[in-house]
Amino acid sequence: MTAPEAAGQDSAGQNKEMLLVWDAPNMDMGLGGILGGRPTAAHRPRFDALGRWLLGRTADLSEQSGEPIEPEATVFTNVVPGGGDVVKPWVDALRNVGYAVFAKPKITDDSDVDQDMLDHIELRRHTPGLAGLVVGSADGQAFAEPLLEIAREGVPVTVVGFREHAAWAVSSVELEFVDLEDIPGVFREPLPRISLDALPDDGAWLTPFRPLQALLK
């Protein structure tokens, strides 16, 4: 994978970056679990709103440090064979907003993008260096230890996700957790979330995270 260079800078003169790494397969799975199925347009995250939030955090961090910081927003995704035409409008929309997209064919169960995301974080960690890191994922198995290691070096690390699926980040004292729904404008309508600590008096159904037939795969 060849990482995209920050706009307007060469590799020798880059400012430190506020890097967003978005784990699209994992975040889609988490959203599907909350909704109990595929999201409608009202419940698809708006990446322009996410981008404005990232720009705001970058500006705040730059002001605090007194140094210029460049934002970089990246999305990592898998593409199933023959699914390029379906995914292309979404990928093009992301690129039009200002996101770099790393797309990888989903050939086997092991053809995920976890290592590609970690490789990109490691690259940016040293070239040009991280002023801050934001990871959109609930995958603690892949990210918990690497993110804690970076945070212990003094780099502010934020995990964006859904509180129902990211207990490892919610409970961490070294990582900041931001629920995706708390970012202004990301969803057009509130998500139909059910909290076990705030159930309605007459009870509520909790839909399965995956179909029962998945046990046969």
Image (cartoon, rainbow, N blue to C red):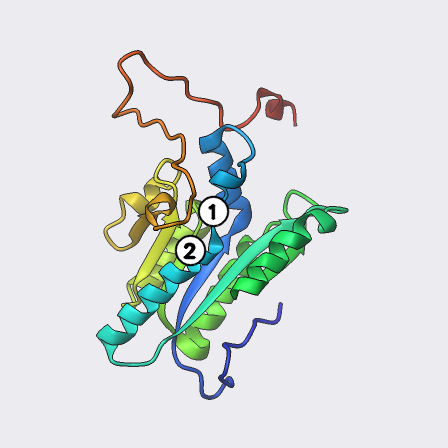
Residue 176 to residue 19: above or below: above
- Above or below for 152 versus 47: below
Relative image position of residue 55 (x, y in whole percent):
37, 66
Residue 14 lies, in percent from the top left, at 44, 83
Q: Considering only vertical position in the picture, is 65 above or below 111?
A: below
Whether residue 19 can be seen here: yes
**Three-letter residue code for mark 2:** Ala
Q: Nearer the viewer, residue 94 or 30?
A: 94
User: In the rendered view, does 29 fall on the left or right side of 78?
Assistant: left
Q: Which residue is more in the foreground, 126 or 3?
A: 3
Q: What residue sits 63% from the left and 50% below the top?
A: 78
Residue 83 rendering spot, x and y as whole percentages = 72, 46
Quadrant (top left, top right, bottom left, bottom right) of the N terminus:
bottom right
Which residue sits at x=51%, y=78%? 7
Neighbor class of circle 1 (other Cα within 10 Å; few <14, some 14-19, many 20+) is some
Secondary structure beneath disc 1?
loop
Residue at the disc numbered 2: 49
Is mark 2 in CB contact (under 8 Å) with mark 1?
A: yes
What type is the residue that disc 1 sits on? Pro
Q: Which mark is residue 147?
A: none
Q: Residues within 10 Å of mark 2 (few under 14, many from 20)?
A: some
x 36%, y 44%: residue? 181
Q: CA distance from mark 2 to mark 1?
A: 8 Å
Residue 99 in view (yes/no): no
Looking at the image, the residue that sits furthest to the right is 82
Dividing the picture into quadrants, the one containing residue 71 is bottom left
Residue behind mark 1: 45
> For residue 213, what is the image quadrant?
top right
Q: Tag 2, which secondary structure? A: helix
